[in-house]
Image (cartoon, rainbow, N blue to C red):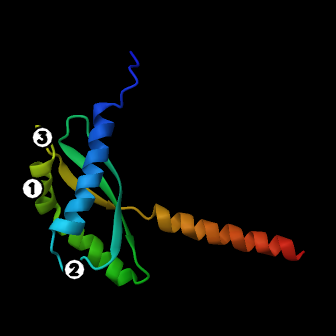
Amino acid sequence: MRRTGKVPRNDRLNGEFQKEIYDIISRKLKNPLITEMFSVVRVDASKDLSYAKVYISVYSTDPNKKDITFKAIQADAKKIRFELAKVIRARTVPELNFVLDDSMEYGDKMDKLFKSINQGEKRD
Protein backbone atom coordinates (compact mmCIF):
# COMPACT_ATOMS: atom_id res chain seq x y z
CA MET A 1 0.00 0.00 0.00
CA ARG A 2 1.42 3.34 -1.07
CA ARG A 3 1.36 6.34 1.19
CA THR A 4 0.88 9.59 -0.67
CA GLY A 5 0.15 11.86 2.28
CA LYS A 6 -3.42 12.31 1.11
CA VAL A 7 -6.44 11.82 3.32
CA PRO A 8 -8.46 8.78 2.22
CA ARG A 9 -11.58 9.61 0.19
CA ASN A 10 -13.96 8.16 2.77
CA ASP A 11 -12.43 10.25 5.57
CA ARG A 12 -12.76 13.41 3.46
CA LEU A 13 -16.38 12.60 2.68
CA ASN A 14 -17.17 11.83 6.32
CA GLY A 15 -15.84 15.24 7.32
CA GLU A 16 -17.80 16.93 4.56
CA PHE A 17 -20.97 15.04 5.51
CA GLN A 18 -20.50 16.05 9.15
CA LYS A 19 -20.18 19.74 8.33
CA GLU A 20 -23.04 19.81 5.83
CA ILE A 21 -25.46 17.77 7.97
CA TYR A 22 -24.93 20.17 10.88
CA ASP A 23 -25.52 23.12 8.55
CA ILE A 24 -28.70 21.57 7.13
CA ILE A 25 -30.20 20.76 10.54
CA SER A 26 -29.30 24.09 12.12
CA ARG A 27 -30.06 26.41 9.19
CA LYS A 28 -32.24 24.80 6.54
CA LEU A 29 -34.65 22.65 8.55
CA LYS A 30 -37.35 24.64 10.24
CA ASN A 31 -38.45 21.94 12.66
CA PRO A 32 -39.91 23.55 15.80
CA LEU A 33 -39.26 20.34 17.78
CA ILE A 34 -35.50 20.85 17.53
CA THR A 35 -35.19 23.15 20.52
CA GLU A 36 -31.99 22.01 22.20
CA MET A 37 -28.38 22.62 21.27
CA PHE A 38 -26.79 19.72 19.40
CA SER A 39 -23.69 18.78 17.48
CA VAL A 40 -22.85 16.27 14.78
CA VAL A 41 -20.02 14.46 16.53
CA ARG A 42 -18.96 12.17 13.70
CA VAL A 43 -20.15 10.47 10.52
CA ASP A 44 -19.15 6.95 9.51
CA ALA A 45 -20.15 6.23 5.91
CA SER A 46 -19.78 2.78 4.42
CA LYS A 47 -17.15 2.39 1.70
CA ASP A 48 -19.81 2.07 -1.01
CA LEU A 49 -21.69 5.09 0.44
CA SER A 50 -24.95 3.15 0.72
CA TYR A 51 -25.46 4.14 4.35
CA ALA A 52 -23.91 6.32 7.03
CA LYS A 53 -24.13 6.43 10.81
CA VAL A 54 -24.45 10.00 12.01
CA TYR A 55 -23.55 10.45 15.69
CA ILE A 56 -25.53 13.28 17.27
CA SER A 57 -24.96 14.74 20.71
CA VAL A 58 -27.82 16.76 22.23
CA TYR A 59 -27.00 19.12 25.08
CA SER A 60 -29.88 19.58 27.51
CA THR A 61 -30.52 19.38 31.22
CA ASP A 62 -34.07 18.19 30.51
CA PRO A 63 -34.05 14.53 29.36
CA ASN A 64 -37.51 14.93 27.80
CA LYS A 65 -36.44 17.88 25.62
CA LYS A 66 -33.26 16.04 24.69
CA ASP A 67 -35.29 13.02 23.55
CA ILE A 68 -37.75 15.17 21.57
CA THR A 69 -34.92 16.99 19.79
CA PHE A 70 -33.12 13.77 18.87
CA LYS A 71 -36.32 12.09 17.64
CA ALA A 72 -37.13 15.17 15.53
CA ILE A 73 -33.71 14.94 13.89
CA GLN A 74 -34.24 11.21 13.26
CA ALA A 75 -37.67 11.87 11.74
CA ASP A 76 -36.15 14.40 9.33
CA ALA A 77 -33.53 11.94 8.01
CA LYS A 78 -35.00 11.83 4.50
CA LYS A 79 -35.24 15.63 4.28
CA ILE A 80 -31.65 15.94 5.48
CA ARG A 81 -30.49 13.39 2.90
CA PHE A 82 -32.36 15.27 0.15
CA GLU A 83 -30.72 18.56 1.15
CA LEU A 84 -27.35 16.82 1.44
CA ALA A 85 -27.67 15.58 -2.15
CA LYS A 86 -27.94 19.20 -3.29
CA VAL A 87 -24.62 20.26 -1.77
CA ILE A 88 -22.39 17.17 -1.87
CA ARG A 89 -20.50 16.35 -5.04
CA ALA A 90 -20.80 12.61 -4.89
CA ARG A 91 -22.61 10.23 -7.16
CA THR A 92 -24.31 8.61 -4.19
CA VAL A 93 -25.59 10.16 -0.98
CA PRO A 94 -25.87 7.56 1.77
CA GLU A 95 -28.99 6.65 3.69
CA LEU A 96 -28.62 8.37 7.06
CA ASN A 97 -28.97 6.50 10.35
CA PHE A 98 -28.85 8.84 13.35
CA VAL A 99 -27.33 7.54 16.59
CA LEU A 100 -27.44 9.37 19.92
CA ASP A 101 -23.89 9.93 21.13
CA ASP A 102 -23.62 10.51 24.85
CA SER A 103 -19.83 10.38 25.04
CA MET A 104 -19.65 14.08 25.96
CA GLU A 105 -22.00 13.55 28.89
CA TYR A 106 -20.10 10.44 29.92
CA GLY A 107 -16.83 12.38 29.81
CA ASP A 108 -18.35 15.18 31.87
CA LYS A 109 -19.64 12.65 34.42
CA MET A 110 -16.21 11.00 34.66
CA ASP A 111 -14.51 14.38 35.00
CA LYS A 112 -16.77 15.29 37.93
CA LEU A 113 -16.13 11.89 39.50
CA PHE A 114 -12.35 12.30 39.23
CA LYS A 115 -12.54 15.81 40.69
CA SER A 116 -14.55 14.57 43.67
CA ILE A 117 -12.05 11.74 44.24
CA ASN A 118 -9.19 14.21 43.98
CA GLN A 119 -10.80 16.55 46.51
CA GLY A 120 -11.34 13.61 48.88
CA GLU A 121 -7.62 12.75 48.75
CA LYS A 122 -6.58 16.32 49.49
CA ARG A 123 -8.60 16.35 52.73
CA ASP A 124 -6.67 13.40 54.20
Q: Amino acid at mark 3?
A: Thr
Residue denoted by label 3: 92
Q: Is residue 1 visible?
A: no
Sequence order check: which comes first, mark 1 or mark 3? Answer: 1
Residue denoted by label 1: 82
Q: Amino acid at mark 1?
A: Phe
Q: Amino acid at mark 2?
A: Leu
Image quadrant in which you'd find residue 48: top left
Residue 82 rendering spot, x and y as whole percentages: 9, 55
Q: In the displayed structure, would residue 109 be above or below residue 24?
A: below
Sequence order check: which comes first, mark 2 or mark 3? Answer: 2
**Picture residue at 34% right of the left edge, 83% below the top:** 64
**Picture residue at 35% right of the left edge, 73% below the top:** 37
Q: Is residue 14 visible?
A: yes
Residue denoted by label 2: 33
Residue 94 rendering spot, x and y as whole percentages: 17, 46
Measure the C-alpha gap from mark 2 to mark 1: 20 Å
**Picture residue at 20% right of the left edge, 67% below the top:** 27
Q: Secondary structure at mark 3?
A: loop
Sequence order check: which comes first, mark 2 or mark 1? Answer: 2
